[in-house]
Amino acid sequence: MRDRAQTVIIGAGIVGASAAAHLAELGVADVLVLDQGPLFETGGSTSHAPGIIFQTNGSRTMCRIAQDSVALYDSLDVDGERCWYGAGSLEVATTPERMQELKRRQGYARSYGIEGTELRTPAETAELSPLLDPSTILGSYWVPSDGAAKGVKVVEALARRAQAAGVEFEGGVAVTGFDIRDGRVHGVQTDRGTVECERVLLCAGIWGPTVGALAGVPIPLVAVQHQLVWTDPIAELAQEPGSAHGDTWLQQPVVRHQDMSLYFRQRDDHFGVGNYRHEPIVTPQAEIRVAGKRSGSAMQPSLMPFTPS
Ligand SMILES: Cc1cc2nc3c(=O)[nH]c(=O)nc-3n(C[C@H](O)[C@H](O)[C@H](O)COP(=O)(O)OP(=O)(O)OC[C@H]3O[C@@H](n4cnc5c(N)ncnc54)[C@H](O)[C@@H]3O)c2cc1C
C-alpha cells in the first residue's frame, strides 16, 4: 500500500466509490480509497441493499439526485454485466386519501421531468405485477423509469473509472487514527501503516461516528437497523415469461405500499420484502460488526439467521 496520497477516502461503499470517480472526473486523481472489508463487497450497507430507486420526491433536489443516479447507473457496466434494471415502480393505494397523494406525487414527477408516469386502475396494476391481488387496492402510481441497481457492481464500475484515472483502492485496511497537528490532518493511521495526506473524505456510512471520533469530530448519526427478508423460490416466478432465458435479476416493477411501510422487489425466482413498521432499532457503534478478516467471520455484518422457533 502506498504511504502518501493527497486525498484519502475512508470507505469503499457506493458513496466513497462515487466520490472517487467524481473527483477523478474533475482531475483530482491523487486519491487513495481505504476499506476495512474486502473489495468490493465490503460488508457495508451497499453490500446488502436491494438497490431500489423511487425517483419521485416532493423535494426538487432529492428528485434530481435520484434522476441523475439512474442516468449514471444506467451508463455503467462491469465486463458487460449491467448495473441498472429499469423495470419500473408501482406505489399502491388502499385508501382514497393515498390515491389522492399518488395523484399529487404524479404532479411532482411531471413538473420535475420524470416522464411516462401514470395512475393505474387495479386491473392495470395487476397486469404489471401479476402476483398482486387487484381486489385489495384502489389503484397505483406507475413510474416506468424507476427500478433497482446492483449496488456492489455500481461500486466496482465507478472504482474502475476512478482507477483508470490513477485512483487506488485498498481493501482489508482499517483506519485506526489520524495524525492531526495545528488543526490540520497530516496523515491517516491504519492497521497497515500510516498514509501521509492533505485531506480526508469520510465515507464510512454507519461507522461514521466511530471514525469521526478518532479525529475528535462528532458525527451526529445513529445506526438504525432495517429489516429486509428474502423469500424462498416462488414457483410462479420461475414460470414467468422470459425466466427460461436471459437475465432474470429484475423483471417485475418494484412495489411500494406506503400505508403499511412496505416494499417488495422480485429478484430472479424470489422476492425481497422490506418493512419499516416497527419501533426504530438503534444499534450502538460498539455493536456494529465488521466483515472479513477483522471480524474473523465471513458473514456480512448485517446478515442474521432467523431465530429458530
Ligand atoms: C437492508 C438495507 C436495504 C437498503 N435498501 C436501499 C434501497 O433499496 N435503496 C437505496 O437507495 N438505499 C437502500 N439502503 C441504504 C443504502 O444501502 C445506503 O444508504 C448506502 O449503501 C450507504 O453507502 P455508504 O457508501 O455511505 O456506506 P457503506 O456501503 O456502508 O460503506 C461504508 C464503508 O466504510 C467502511 N469503513 C467503515 N469504517 C472503516 C474504517 N475504520 N476503516 C476502513 N473502512 C471503514 C466500511 O467497511 C464500508 O465498506 C439500504 C440499506 C440496507 C442496510
Image: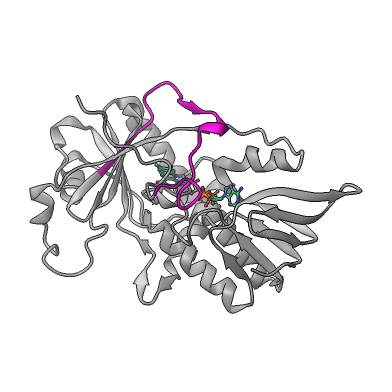
199 is higher (above) or lower (below) than 254: below
Q: Answer left or right for 84 relative to 9.
A: left
- Residue under the point 50% across and 54% down: 37
Asked which colour scheme the image uses, the reply is: one colour
Q: Answer left or right for 228 relative to 175.
A: left
Q: Is residue 295 magenta?
A: yes
Q: Nearer the viewer, residue 146 or 167?
A: 167
- Residue under the point 36% across and 76% down: 80
Which residues are the magenta region? 272-297
Q: Answer left or right for 27 relative to 52.
A: right
Residue 293: image location, x then y, percent: 47, 52
Q: Is residue 71 visible?
A: no
Residue 125: image location, x then y, percent: 21, 44
- The quadrant of the picture occupied by the C terminus is top left
- Residue under the point 46% across and 24% down: 280
Q: Is residue 178 magenta?
A: no
The answer to which quarter of the image holds residue 192 is bottom right
The answer to which quarter of the image holds residue 7 is bottom right
Q: Is residue 39 visible?
A: yes
Residue 74: image location, x then y, percent: 42, 66
